[in-house]
Each structure stands twice: as C-alpha cells, then as structure tokens.
Image (tube, rainbow, N blue to C red):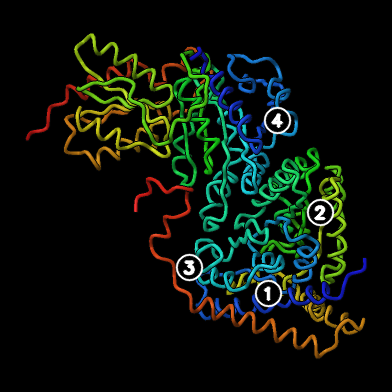
Amino acid sequence: MTVMSYLGAIGAAQREAMEADPRVIIMGEDVEANVYGTMGGGKSRADKGDFLQMFGARRIRNTPISEEAMVGAAAGAAMTGLRPIVDLSYSSFLYMAMDQLVNQVAKNRYMFGGQASLPVVFRSAMFFGLNTGAHHSDRPYPMFMNVPGLKIMVPATPSDAKGLLRTAVDMDDPVLSFEACILWGLKEEVDEGEYRIPFGVARTHRHGNDVTIVGISTGVHAALQAAQKLEAEGISAEVIDPRTMVPLDSDAILNSVARTGRLVIVDPAHTTCGAAAEISAIVAEKAFDCLRGPIMRVTTPDTQIPFSPAIEKQLYPDAAKTIAAVKRTMEARTRAA
Amino acid sequence: MTRPNDLLLEMQKRMLRIRFFDERASKMVKRGEIPGTVHTSIGQEAQVVGACMALAEGDYMTGNHRSHGHPIGKGAALGPLMAELTGKATGVCGGKGGSMHLADFKVGSLGESGIVGSSIPIATGAALSSKVLGTGRVSLAFFGDGAANQGCLYEAMNLSSVWDLPIVFLCENNQYALSTPAHTVTAGVIAERAAGFAMPGVRVEDGQDVLKVHDAVKTAVDRARAGQGPSLVEVITYRFNEHSEGLKLGTDYRNPAEREAWMKRDPIKMFRAHLIDKGIADAVVLDALEAEVAAEVEAAYQFAEESDYPAASVAFKDLYTEPFGVTQ
C-alpha cells in the first residue's frame, strides 16, 4: 500500500494497463506533455512527459482539437484491434463528439448484431466547484445514462478510481469515466499492485440503520460528512456509493432501503432526469412498501453554473443540505399500517 | 494499368450483383416485403465497384445510407444482406441493422451509417489501428456530396494527414443531397479541398467508367499502403432512381434532360461493350454471367423469404458483451 492522490491513481491505472497490453494506446489533447498529471502514474503530479518517454509516440498520441474525429477514430480503432483510452480533458467537451458517442460508439455493437466490440475508455474531468464558469463546470453523466450501450464510472476515491479504470480498460465495452477535479488532490492508501473493481458493484462506506444515503462522485464525501454529524445526533446513516452508474447496483440500494426505510440521494448533477431521479424511481417502484418517509434528492438546481465564487458553491450538494434532507425524511409521519 | 481478365469479369459481376440486388430490393419495398425504405446504388455501380476492388481482401471500409452496394462491392454474400433488409434472424446483423446499417466484418465492411458523414471517423480509426499494429491494411471511407459539408470529414482529413494514416476518403458525388443540388450548397470543388490538408485530391469526372474509378482509387490505396498517408478521391456519378424507393416528391428537382443524358451512361452497359470491344469476353459469356448473377439474387431472395424472424429476446442482445440490467 502507498499513499496516492485521486489524480495519481488514475495515472497508475493507465500505466498498469499500458504495460499489460501493447494494444492499449492513449490519445487526446496535450497528453504528450502530461498537462493534467495523469500521464505519469503513481505520483500526484508526474514528471513532464513520463508516458511519452515510457511508451513512445506510437502509443501516446497528441490529437488536434477535434473531438468528433478523436472519439470516432478511437471507436474505429477499437473495432479493429486496439484498446484506446481517450483523454477528453473537460467533460463539457464530450458534447463536441455527441454524434460519435451516441450514434457510433453506443450503437455499433448492437446495430451490427454483435460483430463489433468496442474496448475503449473516454476519460473526462468535471471541473465544477472551481470557478471555471458555465462551459467547464458540467456534470453530464446522467445524459449518457440515457444512452444504452455505454458504461459509466464515477469514482469518488483514489482506490476506486484505480481499480475501476483498470477494469474499464480491460473491458470489451465502451466506458465513459467522469472524474471530479475537486477530488484530484484527495489522498488515501492505495494498493500499488494490480487490482480490478467490478462494474455494477456498489461500495458501502458506512453501515447504518435509520437512513440510506446514496452518494455519487463528490456526493459520497458530502454524504460521509453528513453521516458523521448525524451520528452525534443519534441518527445512524448508511452511506452507499454505486461507483458505476451503468451498470447500476440497484440491489445494494434496495437491500439497504429495505432495512432503513429511508433514502436520500446526493448527486451533483442537475435535478431533472438526473441520476438521483433514476434511483428514486427504481426505489419507488421496487421498494415502495419499505419506505417510511419521502425519498429526498440533494442535487444541483436546474440552473447553469455561474462564475463568481460568491454564488457558485451554494448550488452544489453539501453536508448541510444532506443533513437537512435526512431530517426531512426522518420527520415525515410514518405511513399508517 | 494492366488488369487480368478475371479481375475485369469480376468487376462486371459485382456491378451486376449490385444492380440486380437493388432492382429486387426496390420491387420488394413496393410490394411491402421490405419494411421501411431502401436507397439504391443503381447507376452508381462503377463508382462503388471500382473503389471496392482497388482494396485488398483484408482492407476496411465504411459507408452511408446508400448502403447495399458497398458490402456487395467488397464481396459480401448476398443472402445474409437480403435477409437483413427483411429483418430476418439470418440477416448479416441478425435483423438489428436493416438497410441503412449493413456491416459484414468478414469482408472488412465495418458498417454503413444512417447519419450522413458519421462513419468517416470510424474508418479513420481503422486506419489508425492498422498503423499502430502494423497490419498493412488500408481503410476507405465512402461518403456523398452531402457529407462533404459535414465538419467531421475535415477533422478526420486533418487527423489522418498529421498522423499519415493509410486511408482513402472517397466522395461519391451523385450531385444531389436528396433534393438539393450539390453546387448550390458546396463551395468550390470537393477534390480541391484536399490541398488544405496536404494530401492529394483527384476528381474522376467519369464515374460511370469502372476502370477510371479503379485507376484513381488504386493509386490512392497503393500510396496509403506504402505509408505515404491519406488521399481524397471525388467521383462524379448519378443515381438513376429516386433518393429512396417509394419517395414521391412534388417537384422535379432533377432536370429531365440531365437525367436522360446520365441514364444513357449506364456503367454496366458501358463496361459490357468495353469487354466485348476488347475481346475480353463475348456476348455468350456475358449473358451467362448475367444469368448467373440473376440466379444468385433469386437465391438470396429465397433465403431471406424462408428465414425466420428473430426471437423477441434478440432485441436485448448484443448491447454489451455481457448482458446486464436490461429490463425485458
């Protein structure tokens, strides 16, 4: 075990995958110069150009600012024997390649009757909470949950980022990885050896009996802080991180709600048709009889993200909003038997 | 370029396959035997076959909504293609693709695309894998004059050029994007746009001549295989049928005199005359070839007719390598 940052863990997973399989390549804007620090591995901020030196320009490929070509070419390469990792920098840049992601990447295996496999990973960072304004602050994973054929990972910790990303590269299906910039510096003990975390298996961070809090990405940390404070007030909260939105471990959530009878979802995406909305619907459909209070969503309101530091942070889920949501569902009158 | 006689006869055979297959498909749409519509390559056979036969067997290609000719030109079996048009389980995509999404990976056909221009980056990626893995395969992207105004083409051309990818961008300029004349929406000459990306660009003015198309594309393919990078080939041709079968537009957007002039330049009749003229085959041989292809298409039709529809559960298969969480 060694202490790794979230960013360093992403780099470590990429290095592992590059070393394990010569078919793995990395392409994207500024990857040669390791601008974002994920092209070195292991270190929080790797030396400039680490991967380029280690693996050479054949496998570490700077691209022009052409997201459609980059995403489509990675898909075509994956269909013909490579296993590309595409670094799309900011998550908002995915929209430039929407046709390729939705019409080609997600559909080609299905549409061609299983003739195609698309072992490709599209990594992007969500820069919200860092005063980058409306164009860089999106949390767009729920949009892609609405596109069958894509798998989606939203790691919240360094160890999950490393294990999930390694699984993603080894998988024969296309994966979108949504990484939260605000977590880049987060550190914990991580196994530096090879390990893989399966998709569709939630992680229970904390056991509890009174309420289930499902946290997504940065929402996991808001949920954990809230749970700690609630404990002092005698409320026992269970905190679950689905880790992958597609496939979603709905069983883990349903089983937890069956015990606690209450559900709060902390999701930094927008409210409408968000991940929290989907989880709410699943629980309302399948565990209605277990519910002892309303399902509460703690999300970002349906507005765009403003630049000014004075007004940005208030929009995102945090511990205080999570605690308020827990209290609201705890106070709701228990349904008459 | 000298070509062996069997190659020349194979060109005529594949053009006939496309013609008879699409004529049958057109009838099937009218009789309701094919759900939806189809876009035929009738009239464009020389452009398709000249390009496909410039490729080697293991080479890759992607296509578009005018989609049957490409896999046929690349050598795909007709039965599974026809069964795909009728939505049968034996279809080349198991009935999940349909006319606009044919793909036959066995012959390097990586997929047609119902979205104009959308498969161009896919072909670019196939060229990238060839380059990284050193397989020596060439990739070819078919797209129309309409797709020539999609941004992804220029992103792909630029990327291919800076990476020296083994790819041929093949513009099938049939002069109309549905009803819109190309010259009214396209600035300059498409082939000349290649210069902006530091690659050769050639225009085949007579795309009804299979040998002229073959020459131009072969030059581009050889160049790509030799590691010299991408090329753009624009082929001027004409579709004889409507944009799609069964489509009836209120306005005649194509000048009847223009259409008549192009219909006289039927690539199959022209090449038949050429083969006879050069003493490569006589009328008896060529008649037999036509009968053979007609029988192939009839057998493909029978195969499609006799095949079963897919089971309902097939709608949930092949989304992922391992099915999960799909609510049935």
What is the spatial separation of the Cα atoms under label 3 and label 1, in whole angstroms?
Answer: 29 Å
Point out the tag, 3 or 2, that comes first from the N-terminus. 3
Residue shown at 77%/43% (left/top)?
B160
What is the spatial separation of the Cα atoms under label 4 and label 1, in whole angstroms?
Answer: 47 Å
Query: Residue under circle 1?
Result: B241
Subunit ID for the residue under disc 4: A
Question: Where is residue B113 drawn, in percent x and y?
Answer: 62, 57
Query: Residue under circle 3?
Result: B89
Query: Residue under circle 4?
Result: A60
Q: Looking at the picture, does residue B200 appear above or below residue A15?
A: below
Which quadrant of the figure contains the C terminus of chain A?
top left
Q: Amino acid at mark 4?
A: Ile
Q: Amino acid at mark 3?
A: Ala
Which of the 4 image quarters holds residue A270? top left
Indicate which disc residue B190 carries.
2
Please determine if labels 3 and 4 lie on a single subunit.
Answer: no
Subunit ID for the residue under disc 3: B
Kindly tell me whether residue B248 is visible in this rendering: no
Q: Looking at the picture, does residue B187 appear above or below residue A167?
A: below
Q: Amino acid at mark 2?
A: Ile
Tag 4 near tag 2, CB within 8 Å:
no
Indicate which disc residue B84 carries.
none
What is the spatial separation of the Cα atoms under label 3 and label 2, in whole angstroms?
Answer: 40 Å
Question: Where is residue A257 drawn, in percent x and y?
Answer: 23, 31
Point out the tag, 2 or 1, that comes first from the N-terminus. 2
Residue shown at 92%/81% (left/top)?
B278
Question: Where is residue B243 drawn, in percent x and y?
Answer: 65, 68
Local SS, label 4: strand
Residue shown at 78%/53% (left/top)?
B168
